[in-house]
Amino acid sequence: MEKRTVADSDDSLMRVLAKLKSLRTHLPQTLVPEEFVAQYHSVLSSLRPLGYPIGEWTIPDHWMSTISDSGSKKRYVARDLLLTRLDAVLAFIHSARNAGPPRVSQSSE
């Protein structure tokens, strides 16, 4: 098994960010089909091996609506709801990347 380096992790994170930004760019205007949500969840799952928790950014099932269309039922989520999670994960990753190492406070003893 190969060891992952910091450069590998940075590359993987940049790839995830590129995919998330692409998904955001190509979101349907009102209702987002379940297949799109599955693709979003697949990209999110790529963050787990990099040490990022993903649970709070997934789309909960109760946000999904079922719509009958020509005899078939399809599931959708409202675009605005998906954007709340997508924008949050993008902002979190951006903040985490720019935060740098934690500062060590010096106490006056």
Image: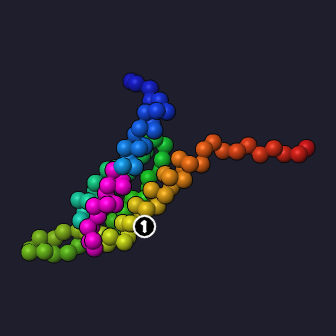
In the picture as drawn, the residue positioned furthest to the left comes out as: 70
**Which sits in the foreground, 31 or 69?**
31
* Image height of 58 relative to 96, above or below: below
* Three-letter amino acid code at the position of disc 1: Thr
**Which sits in the foreground, 2 or 61?**
2
Q: Residue 61's image quarter?
A: bottom left
Q: Residue 70's image quarter?
A: bottom left
Which secondary structure, mark 1? Answer: helix
**Image quadrant occupied by the N terminus:** top left
Residue at coordinates 28% horizontally, 73% vertically from top-left?
30
Count neighbours of disc 1 (C-alpha within 10 A) and say few if under 14, some if 14 to 19, many if 20 or more. Answer: few
**Image quadrant occupied by the C terminus:** top right
Residue 92 coordinates in the image, percent (x, y)? 50, 55
- Colouring chosen for the image of the structure: rainbow
Highlighted range, magenta: 19-32
Q: Is residue 18 magenta?
A: no
Q: Which residue is mark 1?
A: 84
Viewer can see residue 34: yes
Residue 53 coordinates in the image, percent (x, y)? 47, 50
Residue 27 coordinates in the image, percent (x, y)? 29, 64
In the picture as drawn, the residue positioned furthest to the right comes out as: 109
* Image height of 54 relative to 65, above or below: above
Viewer can see residue 56: no
Q: Is residue 103 left or right of residue 54?
A: right
Residue at coordinates 49% horizontally, 51% vertically from top-left?
93
